[in-house]
Amino acid sequence: MYTEQAHPDAPDMVALVVTGPREHALRRVPRPEPVGDQALVDVSHVALCGTDLRLLRGTLHDADYPTVPGHEWAGVVRAAPTRPELVGRAVVGHNFLPCGSCAWCARGAENLCESLDEIGFSLPGAFAEALCVPAENLRLLPDGVSGAEGCLVEPLCVAVHAVDRAGEVTGRSVGVIGAGAVGLLVAQVARGSGAKSVTVVDPVASRRAVAAELGLGAEADLSRFEADPPEVVFDATGVAALFPRALTATRQGGTCVLVGYSGSEATPFEPSVVMLRELTVVGSLSGVGMIDRAVELVANGVVRLSPLVSPALPLAHYRSVVDTPATEAPLRAFFAVDEETR
């Protein structure tokens, strides 16, 4: 949990502090200092994803207050006592700190760790001028990749894990429901993994335009999949009510992967649809352990990030994003932490 305890003479910084449902503001708080194997990173860019917006809007059912959000970020290392070669380098990082000792960690399923900490939720996040991260969690930002693009490495990790959870996609038709950032990243990873065809469905024209720019098939209505179901379907909407249609949009004997987070929303569905059509339904949670593969996909040009990036806003404009309807919002809202803020 986030606290503001620090030496009274410590320098301060600006951070977005969320103290409760719909209770948040930019505040001056103590600047963190690295401890042990931590590195201090000056944040250059941070993005707000759907989960962050649920937190700010008070609809994240398992929120841990108070907290500083921000788990999609990029920055420059200011100090790294155990990794001095990182100082001054542009980096991204993965945000999970598993315990390493529970049964799930022993099985290599660290995303299911019984006492998992995550930067941006249980630990202070990057919607601030600086944050402390274990140095081993950091990776260099590939050459030519901007800070805003670097924010998308974290959701790319989610996409890599989701495609892994689908099993073999090589030579299979793939459909992605929802052309948000995660959906478009899943589609690119699936294509890079050898999928025969990849088509996304989204009612928002601007999102379909981004899919087309990426060379992906794009449709406005899910009836396209229901008429000719793909063998593998990813539901990246986070809308519980679409789950029954995601099942009927999956080809008989196919696989449906749930990668969008719908919180505590519930919806009825017919279990017999799964049984009679012999569907495999798979959940996919986070992207722990995927950052090296994600960075490589970007560095090798298999995944393009720039079409998903919109102009970065100042930190002080975050409320305008919180109040924007989903149908009018960009794929991701990016914020720049500039020298004037510091």
Image (cartoon, rainbow, N blue to C red):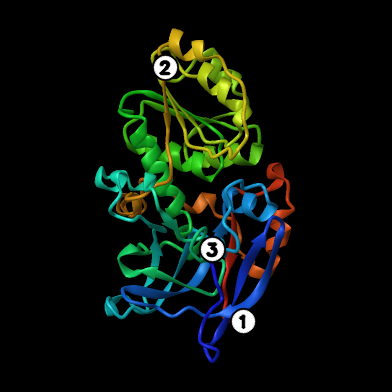
Q: CA distance from mark 2 to mark 1?
A: 54 Å
Q: Secondary structure at mark 3?
A: strand
Check if mark 1's residue and mark 3's residue have beta carbons within 8 Å. Answer: no
Label 3 crowd (10 A; few <14 / some 14-19 / many >=20): many
Locate residue 211, reporting x and y percent. Answer: 53, 38
Which residue is most to the top?
Answer: 276
Foreground label between 2 and 3: 2
Locate residue 22, reporting x and y percent. Answer: 72, 57
25 sits left or right of 189 in the view: right
**Residue at horizontal 44 percent and vertical 80 percent from the top:** 33
Disc 2 designates what residue?
A: 279
308 sits left or right of 36 in the view: right
| Mark 2 residue type | Leu
| Mark 3 residue type | Val
Label 2 crowd (10 A; few <14 / some 14-19 / many >=20): many
The quarter in which the C terminus is drawn is bottom right
Q: Is residue 286 above or below residue 69?
A: above
Which residue is most to the left?
Answer: 106
Q: Secondary structure at mark 1?
A: loop
Name the disc covering residue 46, or none: 3
Q: Quadrant of residue 280?
A: top left
Name the disc covering residue 340, or none: 1
Mark found first going from the N terminus, 2 or 3:
3
134 or 176, nearer to the observer: 134
Check if mark 2's residue and mark 1's residue have beta carbons within 8 Å. Answer: no
Locate residue 208, reporting x and y percent. Answer: 59, 36
Q: CA distance from mark 1 to mark 3?
A: 16 Å
